[in-house]
Image (cartoon, grey):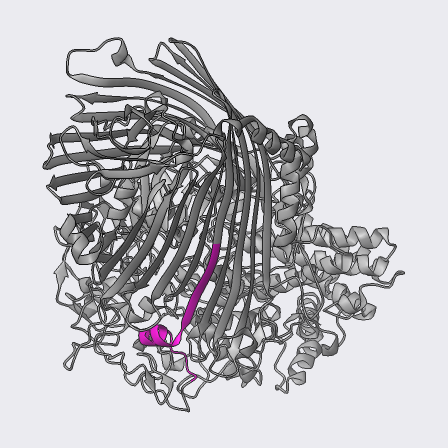
């Protein structure tokens, strides 16, 4: 501490002397800032150079601020006006007591040349000097997205920044992938940095706490068996109030992100929050009201009732196979709409109040927000509330030393609905209920009534209900999350002299999330008798970052800077949870109110890192800008012999228009090339030799297994993972190049980027030969390539004072290829419905499974007695083999099963794009965003299961079957390969054969109901979509009458829509419902009774003063 | 409280780091105890702790998926309702299905743990403990060899990252040696595991008997190839084997979630009701009016005992018994090696070596003990009695492979009941010594001890 004190004292002595000027009358500076077109510019900052004295303009472009008398001595000073997207302009003013009027006209600068952008870890640079592609998302775009979750608000905003939400449930998490996936180790989410401090963006499912029933694990970022069930899981970056965000910079490739070294392998999202400006205190109160509706109801049939083979099974009073499905007779009585009965119109309200201001030495911004989201599921248990409070302040202690701090608190709490592959969840029971069964009332004399137990009475009420009644799930279960989160930092900036600056930030992020899952006494299945899961997730990150930056201009043709930095980080994660079974009394859902308890689960990790970094820039002839940096990262997760690793980067930007300036076409042109290395730390403790006390799961199914502790005797197993002896960070080496050009006087600009990355030393937790005594070993052995292209095009065809039109498009393509996985045939990355794997020669995450016998796909001898090659001769690749009932299929006219596991589909999109248009007419602005995803397969398991259950709409047109064979069925004659029935080429002796399609196909053949009864392939669907993400119309009222009427300076109003329309081939609810929850999975594209998405209609009012 | 302590410490360290001249002093920052070693799990284990875990591993092997599939394929159990249990019924399994059971032979509480227990017991001079762990090793490995044939053993859990596959018959031979050594050791000096022994609570006599019955069982496994010498050796061993039902070698369970018998554990999952009675066993027991029916099964909806007929696939639901007999209790001690098996080994070996008359007393003893009438000691009667007595025991499958008794018809549409399992895809992927898939076909490939298909 002594050193710091000396340092501060020295700073005071050195810098405070000039401030001791004589007291005088203050000066008030006022004026107006407009664009060249005459349009007033709001939000422009006007300040005196070299001080923090200044203000921001209001909706009319007006500003006003006072220079304290102590600083007014008749001296001349430079007054500068700045605004994002415009060229800054300065004027010389003489500070004398009284009033000074100074207007500014700013030229458009859509390329933001000259703007300073943060580039991470305390470094910053000017836009035109960047040697890597820049993607920034402004607060304006974030607000227009109308998303409470900042990650979701990034959807469709930048090429190759792919965002998808796990469901439309309130609080549901979103995942983000930048330039594909590069690791199999831990998370594939980027690092999130808020105001220079890394924050937690994990997603932990409460289901993870339940090791016994679902094989949960507590490892963050690690997939496990439980992820298809549980509730929607928030991603923790959603604790940030999007209204507080000034802008988001996305560092995509290693060439940009290398400054974060071993934590930047998946890219970095740099969030800068809003800060106050000196000047009169400004107030903004805004209120946004949203109506949320389900985008699509599930297509269910409403014609056929409960039963099998056309026979009604009643009575159904406890588990009976004939009661499960809807293959009964045609319904004569009433039918019930199970697709929509559990949903209603939800609503979200978002209220924010912001105050900001300051004087020549101090600025502050105080913001509060309350977001209340009422979900689209009926009942009281589908909401998520987030209250946020934030204070940001800076104070100039002495002219050269500014200290500041950011402090934010979030209280988020929600009640969520059980979902997914879960007999106590909502949709399994809902969509499987036969159309002739009324799910209401769900209780009879207090007893839980389901379509499998239709008349519960005291003598049968403990019978197996198979699935919960959906309304029992909705009204009786309780799944809650309650989060307290504090993110805070203090920082100081010391300008030692005109060439040397120090910057110090100490930040902390502490979050605690209390979870409860309460399944009442009459829950179905494994939770029969009731089950309570209680747990806590605590995360705590502390980060220290010190930088020193020196700049020197050697001559007009040569300037240089050097930044040196030091960083320490501490990251702790802890969960503690207990599962209790069999409730004693119906309520409360408290762990003490249970008869038995599973062994509690207690898991914690601590990771520490220390880094040294340096970055140097060289500006040559004001046209060639070179940057080189090196980060040396140490981490507790590296093995002890390799505690540190180096991550270099270098880039060059050449503003060629400074040399060759072809007429008036190109106004700006820059070529850039960059190379960088960034990494991913190993998961903690892979080098530890440990023994385990937990259950060996999967011994039969659904978490059956034995703990090593038995009959009261403490036991231990050897850990199945062999301790690693050598473990280094993964390393992505990436080369990117491209150009940014502005043409037609900047009426258009185009940015193109090509990149080629190779990730080496990918940590593979590879299976080892089990007979060695271990099952896995972590080692640096994999190689993954990612290559891609990105384009951003912005057109500004019309720019006038009263109207303007801008249109922009983005395109990103990423192709990954697994090069090496240490000789393994494949390695599992996710395993939910079917396996997603890393396999050499394929994109990471490729889906593997079994399917039908197909030409060129199935082995030649897959059907005994048939030479597939000769049958397929001259037929298209992938043609379906249709049997005549004599070879492999039990039925004539049906396809055959191929048990061989094969690569089925790629869940990664081929390309993604977006199209945005912004039209301003006077004070009205209309803007819209289309978000496009091409390719990326989805496993639609919901459809397969509902085929088997006979409730899917596709099964409405059905043959009547009295037995499992074709001969037992009449009606609905179909031939495979025809336009409306599994279109595509067919071969084989049964090709073209018309057969009756009903229960014999959908339920008993085992070939249709993927992956429910085995064959995965028919579930694969195209996940392409075009989404009308955003539409908004904004109008600003201002002028004296607003002031007279309301006492405000302006009132802005916005009506908007979100997810208004989706165009997709996907047959399930929504192709974006691909995530399994939060950002838990690497691969999006699993749909098994996932909850629907929502479309929203928004109206918003903002009052400004 | 934890967090409050860390913050000042971090600030202190931060301050230390500010002194640019002494950056070396910061290196300890990375090596805090919580960051350096896993704070969640013990980094050491005692012999007793490993031994309890190893016993849990034995429970898993003897009651888990291997026993379930044997029960299904031997038509003692059957799968319904269209999910994986039903698919297993018609032999629809793949290399992934039995990955975990194969892995757990060696890892976690498997051979690695048993070898560690043996080594530490030997180091402590506890011969009894060492011998008992050797018996468990023999049971573990012998069961594995009986299912997969050639398996890694001589080089397993050692330094070789890709252990060789030993010939199945050689594995049996080394297990006999191991059991002889175990029997000597158990009778030697040392306190033994005592209370942490969940099979016999450290009773040396019972362990020695069980070791002899195990020897007899493994000799029987070689009888299809070796013939009379195997029967002779098995008979000699069985004569020293388990002397009464009270000495049966059974698992031990408690009511805690993951300490329950695996059969009821599974019956309480959503897949549980999918596993039901098999027609072959139920019909046989009904024909003999066997008193164990209510022990094994519940009455079907129609008020009778009945099983699903996998050979036709059409048994109506109301005629199928659930596996909810009196055995379906969390704490049921699953018999692994029993007096009945021992007696019936004596019956079979005597039948083979000396004829029905020599076999008769042993068959009679077993049937009388259950209150059943005596029947002539034909090989069929002996094996059918064993089929009933060893319900849910993997050994039923081994007996059938060897004798083809009781006669079984393969599942609908199938020509043969498998005689083995796939190794599991992990071993296949990681160990080049694993026989190729062509040498693993369930229907055409036989294990070395079982050359003749039924």
Given residues A180 and A89, the one toward you in this image is: A89
A320 sits to left or right of B256: left
Residue A473 sits inside the magenta stretch: yes
Work out whether A905 lies above or below A1074: above
A893 sits to left or right of A523: left
Work out whether B270 lies above or below B373: above
Given residues A888 and A907, the one toward you in this image is: A907
Residue occupying image coordinates x 19% and y 17%: A666
Residue B242 sits inside the magenta stretch: no
Q: Quadrant of residue A959?
A: bottom left
Q: Quadrant of residue A856?
A: top left
Picture quarter with the N terminus of chain B: bottom right
Work out whether A154 lies above or below A760: below
Give the x, y percent position of residue A849.
37, 48
> Range of the magenta residues?
A462-485
Is residue A373 visible in the rendered structure shown here?
Answer: yes
Work out whether A893 lies above or below A24: below
Q: Quadrant of residue B352?
A: bottom right
Give the x, y percent position of residue B34.
65, 47
Is residue A893 visible in the rendered structure shown here?
Answer: no
Given residues A307 and A126, the one toward you in this image is: A126
Residue occupying image coordinates x 33% and y 13%: A623
Q: Residue furthest right?
A: B189
């Amino acid at each position: 501490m002594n050193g710091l004190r000396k340092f501060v004292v020295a700073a005071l002595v050195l810098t405070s002397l000039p401030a001791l000027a004589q007291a005088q009358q203050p000066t008030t500076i006022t004026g107006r800032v407009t664009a060249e077109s005459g349009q007033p510019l709001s939000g422009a900052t006007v300040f005196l150079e070299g001080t923090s004295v200044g203000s921001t303009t209001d909706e009319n472009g007006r500003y006003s601020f006072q220079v304290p008398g102590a600083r007014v001595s008749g001296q001349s000073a430079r007054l500068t006006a700045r605004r994002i997207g415009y060229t800054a302009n300065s004027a010389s003013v003489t500070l004398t007591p009284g009033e000074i009027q100074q207007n500014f006209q700013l030229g458009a600068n859509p390329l933001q040349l000259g703007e300073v952008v943060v580039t991470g870890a305390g470094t910053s640079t000017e836009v035109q000097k960047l040697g890597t592609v820049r993607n920034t998302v402004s607060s304006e775009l974030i607000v227009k997205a109308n998303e409470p979750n900042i990650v979701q608000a990034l959807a469709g905003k930048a090429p190759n920044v792919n965002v998808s939400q796990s469901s439309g449930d309130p609080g549901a998490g979103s995942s983000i992938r930048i330039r594909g996936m590069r690791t199999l180790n831990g998370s594939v989410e980027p690092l999130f940095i808020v105001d220079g401090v890394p924050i937690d963006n994990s997603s932990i499912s409460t289901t993870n706490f339940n090791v016994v029933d679902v094989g949960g694990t507590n490892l963050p970022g690690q997939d496990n068996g439980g992820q298809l069930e549980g509730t929607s899981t928030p991603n923790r970056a959603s604790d940030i109030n999007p209204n507080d965000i000034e802008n988001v910079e996305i560092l995509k490739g290693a060439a940009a992100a290398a400054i974060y070294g071993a934590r930047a392998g998946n890219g970095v999202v740099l969030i800068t929050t809003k800060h106050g400006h000196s000047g009169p205190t400004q107030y903004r109160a805004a209120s946004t009201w949203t109506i949320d509706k389900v985008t699509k109801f599930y297509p269910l049939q409403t014609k056929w009732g409960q039963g099998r083979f056309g026979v009604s099974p009643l009575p159904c009073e406890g588990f009976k196979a004939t009661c499960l499905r809807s293959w009964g007779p045609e319904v004569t009585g009433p039918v019930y709409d199970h697709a929509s009965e559990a949903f209603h119109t939800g609503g979200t309200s978002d209220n924010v109040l912001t105050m900001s201001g300051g004087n020549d030495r101090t600025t502050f911004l105080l913001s509060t927000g309350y977001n209340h989201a009422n979900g689209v599921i009926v009942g009281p248990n589908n909401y998520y509330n987030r209250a946020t409070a934030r204070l940001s302040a800076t104070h100039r202690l002495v002219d050269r030393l500014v200290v500041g701090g950011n402090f934010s608190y979030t209280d988020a709490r929600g009640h969520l609905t059980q979902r997914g592959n879960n007999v106590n969840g909502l949709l399994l029971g809902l969509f499987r209920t036969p159309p002739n069964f009324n799910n209401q009332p769900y209780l009879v004399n207090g007893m839980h009534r389901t379509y499998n137990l239709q008349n519960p009475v005291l003598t049968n009420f403990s019978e197996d209900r198979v699935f919960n009644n959906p309304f029992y799930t909705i009204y009786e279960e309780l799944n809650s999350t309650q989060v307290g989160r504090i993110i805070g930092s203090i920082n100081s900036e010391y300008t030692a002299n005109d060439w040397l600056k120090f910057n110090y930030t100490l930040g902390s992020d502490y979050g605690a999330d209390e979870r409860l899952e309460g399944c009442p006494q009459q829950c179905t299945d494994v939770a029969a008798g009731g089950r309570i899961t209680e747990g806590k997730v605590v995360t705590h990150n502390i980060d220290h970052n010190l930088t020193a930056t020196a700049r020197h201009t050697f001559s007009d043709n040569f300037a240089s800077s050097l930044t040196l930095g030091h960083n320490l980080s501490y990251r702790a994660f802890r969960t503690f949870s207990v599962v209790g079974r069999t409730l004693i009394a119906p309520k409360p859902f408290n762990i003490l109110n249970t008869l038995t308890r599973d062994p509690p689960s207690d898991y914690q990790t601590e990771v520490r890192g220390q880094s040294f970094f340096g970055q140097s820039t060289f500006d040559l002839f004001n046209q060639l800008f070179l940057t080189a940096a090196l980060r040396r990262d140490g981490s507790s997760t590296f093995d002890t012999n390799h505690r540190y690793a180096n991550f270099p980067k270098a880039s060059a930007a050449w503003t060629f228009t400074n040399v060759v300036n072809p007429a008036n076409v190109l106004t700006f042109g820059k070529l850039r090339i960059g190379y960088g290395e960034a990494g991913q730390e190993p998961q903690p403790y892979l080098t530890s030799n440990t023994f385990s006390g937990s259950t060996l799961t999967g011994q039969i199914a659904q978490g059956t297994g034995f703990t090593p502790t038995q009959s009261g005797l403490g036991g231990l197993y050897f850990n199945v993972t062999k301790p690693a002896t050598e473990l280094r960070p993964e390393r992505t080496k990436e080369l990117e190049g491209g150009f940014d050009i502005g043409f037609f006087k900047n009426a258009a600009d185009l940015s193109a980027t090509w990149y080629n990355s190779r990730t080496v030393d990918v940590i593979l937790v590879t299976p080892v030969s089990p007979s060695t005594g271990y099952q896995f070993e972590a080692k640096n052995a994999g190689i993954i390539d990612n290559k891609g292209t990105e384009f951003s095009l912005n057109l500004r065809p019309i720019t006038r004072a009263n109207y303007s039109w801008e249109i922009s498009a983005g395109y990103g393509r990423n192709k990954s290829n697994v090069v090496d996985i240490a000789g393994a045939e494949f390695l599992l990355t996710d395993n939910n419905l079917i396996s997603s794997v890393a396999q050499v020669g394929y994109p990471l995450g490729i889906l593997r499974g079994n399917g039908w016998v197909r030409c060129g796909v199935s082995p030649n001898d897959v059907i005994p007695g048939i030479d597939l090659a000769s049958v397929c001769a001259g037929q298209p690749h992938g043609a379906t083999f249709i049997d005549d009932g004599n070879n492999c299929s039990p039925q004539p006219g049906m396809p055959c099963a191929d048990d061989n596991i094969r690569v089925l589909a790629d869940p990664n999109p081929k390309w993604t794009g977006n199209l945005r248009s912004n039209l301003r007419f006077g004070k009205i602005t209309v803007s819209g965003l289309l978000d496009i995803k091409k390719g990326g397969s989805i496993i639609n398991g919901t459809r397969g299961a509902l085929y088997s259950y006979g409730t899917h709409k596709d099964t409405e047109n059905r043959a009547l079957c009295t037995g499992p064979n074709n001969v037992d069925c009449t009606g609905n004659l179909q031939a495979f390969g025809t336009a409306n029935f599994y279109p595509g080429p067919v071969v084989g002796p049964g090709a073209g054969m018309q057969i009756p399609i009903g229960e014999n196909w959908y339920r008993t053949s085992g070939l249709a109901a993927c992956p429910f009864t085995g064959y995965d392939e028919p579930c694969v669907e195209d996940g392409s979509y075009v989404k009308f993400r955003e539409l908004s119309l904004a109008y600003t009222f201002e002028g004296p009458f607003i002031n007279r009427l309301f006492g405000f300076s302006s009132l802005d109003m916005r009506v908007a829509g979100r997810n208004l329309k989706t165009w997709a081939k996907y047959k399930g609810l929504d192709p974006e419902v691909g995530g399994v929850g939060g950002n838990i999975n690497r691969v999006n594209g699993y749909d098994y009774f996932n909850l629907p998405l929502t479309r929203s209609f928004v109206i918003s009012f903002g009052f400004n003063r | 409280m934890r967090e409050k302590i860390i913050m000042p410490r971090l600030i202190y360290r931060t301050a230390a780091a500010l002194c640019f001249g002494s950056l070396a002093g910061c290196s300890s920052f990375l090596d805090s105890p919580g960051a350096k070693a896993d704070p969640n799990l013990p980094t050491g284990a005692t012999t007793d702790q490993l031994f309890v875990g190893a016993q849990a591993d034995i429970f898993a092997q003897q009651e888990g998926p291997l026993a379930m599939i044997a029960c299904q394929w031997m038509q003692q159990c059957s799968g319904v309702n269209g999910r994986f249990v039903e698919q297993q019924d018609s032999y629809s399994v793949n290399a992934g299905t039995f990955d975990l059971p194969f892995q757990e032979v060696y890892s976690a509480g498997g051979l690695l743990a048993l070898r560690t227990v043996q080594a530490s017991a030997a180091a402590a001079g506890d011969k009894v403990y060492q011998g008992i762990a050797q018996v468990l090793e023999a049971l573990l490995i012998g069961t594995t060899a009986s299912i997969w044939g050639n398996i890694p053993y001589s080089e397993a859990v050692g330094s070789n990252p890709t252990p060789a596959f030993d010939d199945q018959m050689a594995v049996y031979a080394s297990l006999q040696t191991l059991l002889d050594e175990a029997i000597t050791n158990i009778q030697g000096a040392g306190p033994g595991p005592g209370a942490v022994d969940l099979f016999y609570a450290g009773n040396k006599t019972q362990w020695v008997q069980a070791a002899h019955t195990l020897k007899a069982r493994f000799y029987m496994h070689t009888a299809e190839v070796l013939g009379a010498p195997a029967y002779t050796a098995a008979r000699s061993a069985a004569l020293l084997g388990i002397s009464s039902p009270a000495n049966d070698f059974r698992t031990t369970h408690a009511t805690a979630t993951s300490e329950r018998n695996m059969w009821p554990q599974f019956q309480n999952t959503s897949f549980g009701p999918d596993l039901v009675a098999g027609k072959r066993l139920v019909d046989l027991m009904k024909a003999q009016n066997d008193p164990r029916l209510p022990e094994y099964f519940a009455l079907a909806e129609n008020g009778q005992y009945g099983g699903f007929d996998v050979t036709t696939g059409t048994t109506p639901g109301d005629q199928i018994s659930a596996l909810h007999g009196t055995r379906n209790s969390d704490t049921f001690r699953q018999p692994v090696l029993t007096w009945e098996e021992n007696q019936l080994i004596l019956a079979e070996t005597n039948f083979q070596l000396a004829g029905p008359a020599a076999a008769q007393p042993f068959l009679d003893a077993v049937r009388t003990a259950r209150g059943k009438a005596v029947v002539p000691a034909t090989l069929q009667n002996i094996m059918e009695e064993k089929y009933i007595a060893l319900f849910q025991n993997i050994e039923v499958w081994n007996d059938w492979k060897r004798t083809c008794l009781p006669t079984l018809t393969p599942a609908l549409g199938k020509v043969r009941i498998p005689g083995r399992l796939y190794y599991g895809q992990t071993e296949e992927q990681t160990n080049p010594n694993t026989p190729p898939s062509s040498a693993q076909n369930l229907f055409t490939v036989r294990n070395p001890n079982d050359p003749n298909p039924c």
